Image: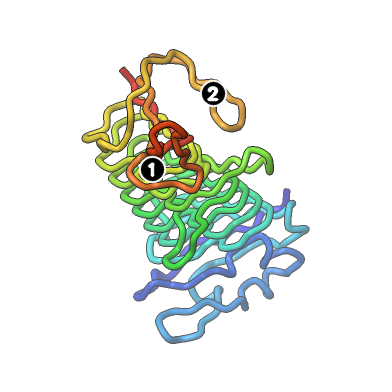
Amino acid sequence: MPEIKLKLKKAPVFPLEAENITPDKFAGKSTADIKKLIVYHGNEEKRLGDFFDISGTGSEINDTKIIIDGDISNVKRIGEKMTGGEIIINGNVGMHVGNNMSGGKIIVNGNADDWAGAMLKGGELEITGDAGHYVGAAYRGFWKGMENGIIKVHGKIGNEALTWVNGSKPAKRFPTLVCGGAGSFLGIHSHGGTIIVEGDCDRCIGADQVRGTIVVKGKISRILPSFKKIGEVKEIELMNGEIIKGKFIEYSGDHSVEKNHSKIDKKTGEISNSSNGRLYVAV
């Protein structure tokens, strides 16, 4: 796979909008053409070559690998809407990395800022350090967040990750988040997401969850009272058919809001706020 190498030579004073750093935009271009790609520094239009030393040429999208060296924590939107290929970032990265991507793979060997993998539609995003708030989440005003693909964060993530996640077993869409630990409001408004937390979580996990599975291998600071305890299990089957073994307490929820699939008891007339959502917490 041909490699295109970028090395930061000039740290941006303001956040640098660099959505053109994707295999899609680099494919078929020479080094000179890549250097001319537009980035925005504040309200000024600049060239990619103004901030990076660049070597290599692009091939087909799926055969293009981009390697970025340097602390680019003030560079935003890398990998936005990418459909294939690979990006490796050796250092911290700014906001919106991999947002709306539908294919390919991004590896961040460092930390990522807010909105990493926002509204991911496919592909894989891996972050070896920590990530900020709203990982895989829906942007404000959207009713669907992450729809497919996988996000792996080895460290801890911030608040409100995977909001409005939308998966579908019949459509074979299995949006999945795996992280080391998480803040509050993880997986709120979930409609079919899979979340696996290797460590601890803060409060309000799974709020307003309709469908989906959340597995917490550590502790939750406070489980919502609208989750109903079912019992102890030793095996969990995820939406994609994978099995997790261990000792967990199973809860259903969230039962706080009347759902479209709520059932009416024919004898009592009472509404049963049933939920297909599941929360599993390690014993």
Label 2 or label 1, whichever comes before in sequence order: 1
Q: Position of residue 64 (x, y in %)?
A: 70, 55
Vertical side of 200 occupied by 71: above or below: below
Count the marks: how many?
Answer: 2
The answer to whether 218 appears left or right of 36 in the picture is left
Q: Residue at x 32, y 49 (%)?
A: 158
Q: Specify the amino acid type for callout 2.
A: Glu
Observer-nearest residue: 34 or 44?
A: 44
Q: Quadrant of the C terminus?
A: top left
Q: CA distance from mark 2 to mark 1?
A: 28 Å
Does dot 1 land on a helix, a strand or a loop? loop
User: As rendered, which of 248 and 267 lies closer to the eye?
Assistant: 267
Label drawn at residue 129: 1
**Residue 19 occupies quadrant:** bottom right
Relative height, residue 275 to residue 86 (above, below): above
User: Dot 2 lies on which element?
Assistant: strand
Q: Amino acid at mark 1?
A: Gly
Question: x%, y% of residue 133?
Answer: 34, 54
Q: Which mark is residue 237?
A: 2
